[in-house]
Image: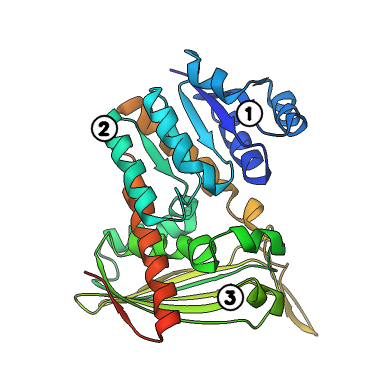
Amino acid sequence: MIVNFSLLGAGRIGRVHAKAVSNNPDARLSAVADASPAAAQSIAAQYGAEVRTIDEIEAAHDIHAVIICTPTDTHADLIERFARAGKAIFCEKPVDLDVARVRSCIEVVKQTGAKLMVGFNRRFDPHFMAVKQAIDDGRIGKVEMITITSRDPGPPPLDYIARSGGIFRDMTIHDFDMARFLLDGEAISSVSAHAAVLVDPEIGAAGDFDSVTVILETAAGRQAVISNSRRATYGYDQRIEVHGSKGSASAENQRPISIEVATAEGYTRPPLHDFFMTRYTEAYANEIAGFIAAIESGAQISPSGEDGLLALELADAALESVRTGRRVILG
């Protein structure tokens, strides 16, 4: 079966997913919708798709699945709309910035029996997946401590900062999900967070932070430490390390070309990837492949809407910890 996709939102991340769908032999990008007709036409022309309205896509019998890459405040409404229309749904994170709204949206998904995957692409990165496999195979024993480093090359535009929901809901949310993934879903019992404005005072003026550290703890005492910054002058910094009772496993930074040159002046290596579009190319492809496989097999979707909800709840707890200066206990 070829899964016919429609892309909702033709921006930067929409282009990433359009490429992943078009490169998959079991999928076809059939339609594109965007508030900007020119943006939709650009992607449609590149991949041989049609430009359609959201109403047309909702009613179309030839569309099996939709990829939602529209602004965050439209996600929940579109999920509910296409769940009722009987489409499989892939939605970029977050489902919404409000926990109560996410819960009500997930309830509609359950009632309709729709398939919903939330776009935590890092679960599908081959390097991070290899670390998870080492854990699952018992090679490092029981997980005790996790360190996640995620730093962007530079901050996003200030208008994005103002509508992103803040660094915890926009950026750290990926790391909250990765911590849960590496802990194999073990519940987080407490959250401690520290935040500062060290990169750009305008980010602080917009009510957000650009430099944060979070400690997650489980009831058994296992810990995950997350380090985020909106500035890494050396490139897109993405690393994880898992320490266990028998050893450790880690995934280091990746480069477009992995070589090392040694001369009398010392050792040099090429720079890191410049951002997520190139660093996580394989992850985006694997993510869409996993979504298609679940559609065809009827297997349980992962990461699910519930995974998106739990990550958002951790983001809210981190913000509460910063505001109160206290560790937040989760019930």
Residue appearing at x 64%, y 77% in the figure: 204
Q: What element carries label 3?
A: loop
Q: Earlier in the sequence, mark 3 or mark 2?
A: 2
Residue 33, image x and y in percent? 63, 28
- Name the residue tied to disc 2: 111
| Amino acid type, callout 2 | Gln
Residue 209's disc number: 3
Residue 83, image x and y in percent? 38, 29
Residue appearing at x 64%, y 63% in the figure: 161
Q: In which quarter of the image is the C terminus?
A: bottom left
Residue 303, image x and y in percent? 37, 47
| Amino acid type, callout 1 | Ala
- Name the residue tied to disc 1: 33
Residue 93, image x and y in percent? 48, 50
Q: Is mark 2 on a helix, strand or loop?
A: helix
Q: Residues within 10 Å of mark 1 (few under 14, many from 20)?
A: many
The residue lying toward the viewer, choosing from 50 and 268, is: 50
Q: Residues within 10 Å of mark 2 (few under 14, many from 20)?
A: few
**Within the image, what quadrant is residue 29 found in?**
top right
Residue 169's disc number: none
| Amino acid type, callout 3 | Phe
Instruction: Say left or right for 302 vs 5.
Output: left
Instruction: Say left or right for 318 vs 6.
Output: left
Q: Cβ–Cβ below 8 Å for labels 3 and 2?
A: no
How much space separates mark 1 and mark 3, taking CA atoms?
A: 33 Å
The residue lying toward the viewer, choosing from 116 and 22, is: 116
Location of residue 302 with respect to 39 vertically, above or below: below
